[in-house]
Image (cartoon, rainbow, N blue to C red):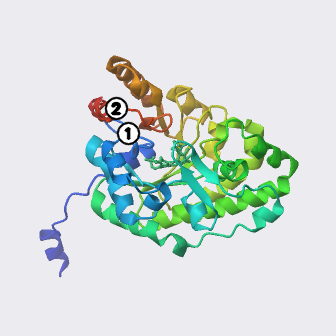
Amino acid sequence: MTPDQAISNPPAAAPPEPEPLLLRAAKGEQVDHPPVWFMRQAGRSLPEYRELRAGTRMLEACRTPDLVTEITLQPVRRHGVDAAILFSDIVVPLVAAGLDIEIVPGTGPVVASPISDAADVSKIRGLDPADIEDIAVAVRQLVAELGDVPLIGFAGAPYTLASYLIEGGPSKDHARTKALMHSRPDVWHALLGKLALISAVFVRVQVDAGASAIQLFDSWAGGLSAADYAEFVLPHSQGVFAALGPAAVPAIHFGVGTGELLDLMRRAGANVVGVDWRIPLDVAAERIGGRTPVQGNLDPALLLADWPVVEAAVRRIVAEGRRAPGHIFNLGHGVLPETDPGVLTRVVELVHSL
Ligand code: CP3
């Protein structure tokens, strides 16, 4: 081809597809309205989920790619959310690495042999990508099915995982966890270092299979002082984000009750900081230095209130989010099982109309 031909016959390139709203908001680009998805959008609030899960244990469902794919797609079809989140659980990589954990309905993860000393930590082996090939299969299937809708991958952060392993199950005060952290810092750091590697492999497998963003859930970090978080948790969460590498996908970092930790959580390496309902998004954005997008922050309990209450809260949150350098609309924590899914659909429509 001569240069002349090249000028008269430009290749018939399709106009470039705009990037999905979620990814643009995560980068702090200007968008007309915030993208919206919900933590725990897949799950017990949906009758089609309850029907599909009947007779299958949670962890078995998480390891069956066709079920993972279908359950992940259900809320996307029903609500028209701007992202899917992989249906799985934070303990899936721990089980895949050989730990004996069951997810008990109505309770949460229960650990057969809780961790209390160096010998317990030394028995934890690493996670090999081959241990979670089923997760890669599910992600690849999902990416093919989702088309333009981005898939968010996730992992539990080392602290939240450690809290389950040390307490043996859900806990209100995380007393054993904090006691081990302070009295055996060597054991603590060895444990969190191992968990960071396991979480890093779990998210890396999802990203390599095509996930467009990831969220690190440090759900229970809000129970820590900033000083304890900085010394005992931050370096390990940093390790998870660092393992993803600089060219990887946008990373969201979320915990509950973390108003005093938000800037440390940003410093762990997040591109977006998740905020629960306790502080306004514009205040949160300021606390993290005014340059990092935020995600949140409707109180999931409000979804059980009358619609005018929900509507006013959604409008307020979107307005507060506009004062942040970027906003992904979400709840301040997961969808409660008793939520009317019709209300979630209305919230999506409302956010998209604003
Ligand atoms: O958000 C999503 O839609 C994706 C799926 C997802 C689940 N768990 C599915 C699930 C995600 C991202 C998680 C992460 C998770 N798991 C976290 C971090 C997020 C958070 O909520 O703070 C935590 C702390 C866990 C541990 C865990 N697993 C708990 C507390 C529970 C609930 C126990 C109960 O029965 O109330 C689980 C089980 C679980 N994980 C369910 C679902 C849909 C319910 C199981 C069921 O339907 O039988």
Circle number at residue 45: 1
Q: Residue 113's spot in the image, x, y percent?
A: 71, 58
Q: Amino acid at mark 2?
A: Asp
Name the outermost residue toward the left.
Answer: 8
Vertical relation: 41 (above or below) 1: above
Vertical relation: 241 (above or below) 256: below
Q: Residue at x 18, y 74 (%)?
A: 6
Q: Residue at x 42, y 55 (%)?
A: 86
Circle number at residue 256: none
Q: Residue at x 41, y 64 (%)?
A: 64
Quarter in which the C terminus is drawn: top left
- The answer to which of 200 and 5 lies nearer the viewer is 200
Quarter in which the N terminus is drawn: bottom left
Q: Secondary structure at mark 2?
A: loop
**Relative horizontal placement of residue 256, taking residue 27 as reference (left or right):** right
* Circle count: 2
Q: Residue 335's spot in the image, x, y percent?
A: 44, 37
Q: Could you say which quadrant of the image residue 93 lies in?
A: bottom right
Whichever of labels 1 and 2 marks the residue nearer the N terminus, that label is: 1
Q: Residue at x 65, y 36 (%)?
A: 222
Real-space CA distance between mark 1 and mark 2, rounded to the nearest whole angstrom = 7 Å
Name the outermost residue toward the front.
Answer: 55
Q: Look at the numbered discs 1 and 2 and tell me whether their residues touch, using CB distance below 8 Å.
A: yes
**Relative horizontal placement of residue 174, taking residue 117 as reference (left or right):** left
Q: Could you say which quadrant of the image residue 302 lies in?
A: top left
Residue 287 shows up from this direction:
yes
Q: Amino acid at mark 1?
A: Ser
Residue behind mark 2: 340
**Relative horizontal placement of residue 329, taking residue 91 as reference (left or right):** left
Q: Secondary structure at mark 1?
A: loop
